[in-house]
Image (cartoon, helix red, strand yellow):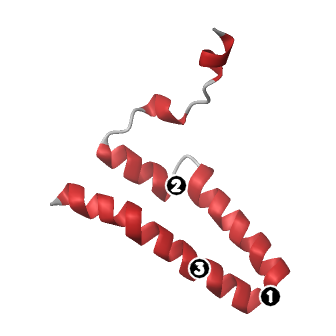
Amino acid sequence: MLAVAIAAAGVYGLPFAGAVGASLLVRLAGWPLGLAACAAVAGFALLTRRSPVRLLYGLVGAPKRHWKADLDLELT
């Protein structure tokens, strides 16, 4: 049951929250500022170490090395 809830949050919850947030930012700040703010929020949500996306990946057991760049593969 927990795995289904985690999968639903990742597949439906986060994208829905992102779409609602982007819509609100664009409507409140206008297209240029709303788009810039949306990009900043998306970058925070996807790229920071304590992002919701990384939290969900950690709950389902994605390895830590998943987040490393594949530079090792390019060098060999």
Amino acid type, callout 1: Gly
- Which quadrant of the figure has residue 30? bottom right
Circle 1 crowding by C-alpha within 10 Å: few under 14, some 14–19, many from 20: few
Badge 2 or badge 1: first in the primary sequence:
1
Q: Position of residue 62 (x, y in %)?
A: 38, 38
Q: Which residue is disc 2 drawn over?
A: 51
Query: Could you say whether the residue bearing mark 3 is in a helix, strand or loop?
Result: helix
In the image, 9: left or right of 28?
Answer: left
Badge 2 or badge 3: first in the primary sequence:
3
Q: Which residue is disc 1 drawn over?
A: 30
Amino acid type, callout 2: Ser
Q: Position of residue 55 (x, y in %)?
A: 42, 51
In the image, 54: left or right of 9?
Answer: right
Q: Classify 52 as above or below 62.
A: below
Query: Could you say whether the residue bearing mark 1 is in a helix, strand or loop?
Result: loop
In the image, 46: left or right of 34?
Answer: left
Q: Which residue is disc 3 drawn over?
A: 21
